Amino acid sequence: RLIGACIMTHSDNNGLVLPPAVAPVQVVVVPIAQHKPGVLDAANALKSRLEALDLRVKLDDSEQSPGKYAQYEMKGVPVRVEIGPKDMEKEQCVIARRDTGEKITVALAELESAVKALLDHIHDNLYAMALKNREDNTFDIQTPEEAKAIVEGKGGFLRSKWCGSLECELAMKERAGVSSRCMPLVQTGTEGTCPVCGRKCTTDIYWGVAY
């Protein structure tokens, strides 16, 4: 379930988007024009420097064309580091982030700090986007009929108070086609009414369609 939730929450039309903490490969180093003198050695040096940070790093020294980038996008590798002859001349490398597709040019001397900061930014951005998506698709409801109209229309999560009775929970499933998903660990503590029986209560609960 956790793997499925990760895939469904973060992935896009290009494939997986994995949070850095759980990605099997956190950084892939891709040498550009690796047949040219020194390029592969430079790429290996970058790999070693990043591994010294206890990061999970892969060097792609295959003979594929730059189109091989697509496989790392599909696999959700958070960061791609590219280095080629022109980069070596300028003592720089190019870093691409999977979550936004943005590319930045970084001085080789700043490689470690740039990659570590970027992995933190990717983590924070994925969380922020997931939280916004959840909030944008969570709707407060007062009755089972209101809940049914939402799930049969735009869809999403439903939020209400709940009296705590099994009868009201089963009635929501019967009348609205939703079941309880979770009770937030952090409760608002505000008073409201149960959407089924109308009794006053304070427990927050989320409802949704079970697949």
Image (cartoon, grey):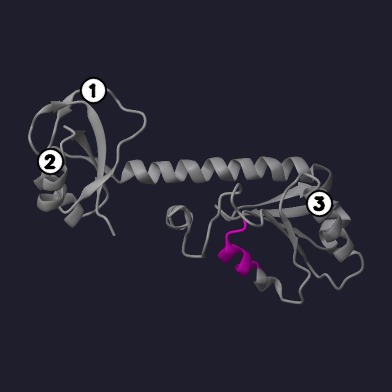
Among the two numbered marks 1 and 3 on one chain, the one whose residue lies closer to the N terminus: 3
Residue 136 sits above or below residue 174 on the image: above
Neighbourhood count class around disc 3 (C-alpha, 10 Å): few under 14, some 14–19, many 20 upward = some
Which residue is tagged 2? Answer: 168
Which residue type carries mark 1? Thr
Is 39 situated left or right of 211 in this image?
right
Neighbourhood count class around disc 1 (C-alpha, 10 Å): few under 14, some 14–19, many 20 upward = few
Residue 48 x/y as whole percent: 83, 53
| Secondary structure state at the residue bearing disc 3 | strand
Of 53 and 205, nearer the camera is 205
> How far separated are the C-alphas under marks 1 and 3?
55 Å
Q: Quadrant of residue 43?
A: bottom right
Looking at the image, which residue is at 65% across and 73% down?
67
Residue 79 x/y as whole percent: 66, 54
Which residue is tagged 3? Answer: 92
Q: Quadrant of residue 146?
A: top left
Q: Label the magenta part by its dominant secondary structure.
A: helix
Among the two numbered marks 1 and 2 on one chain, the one whose residue lies closer to the N terminus: 2
Which span is picked out in magenta?
Answer: 69-77
Is 156 situated left or right of 69 in this image?
left
Residue 61 sits above or below residue 82 on the image: below
The label nearer to you, 1 versus 2, is: 2
Among the two numbered marks 2 and 3 on one chain, the one whose residue lies closer to the N terminus: 3
Residue 84 x/y as whole percent: 81, 63
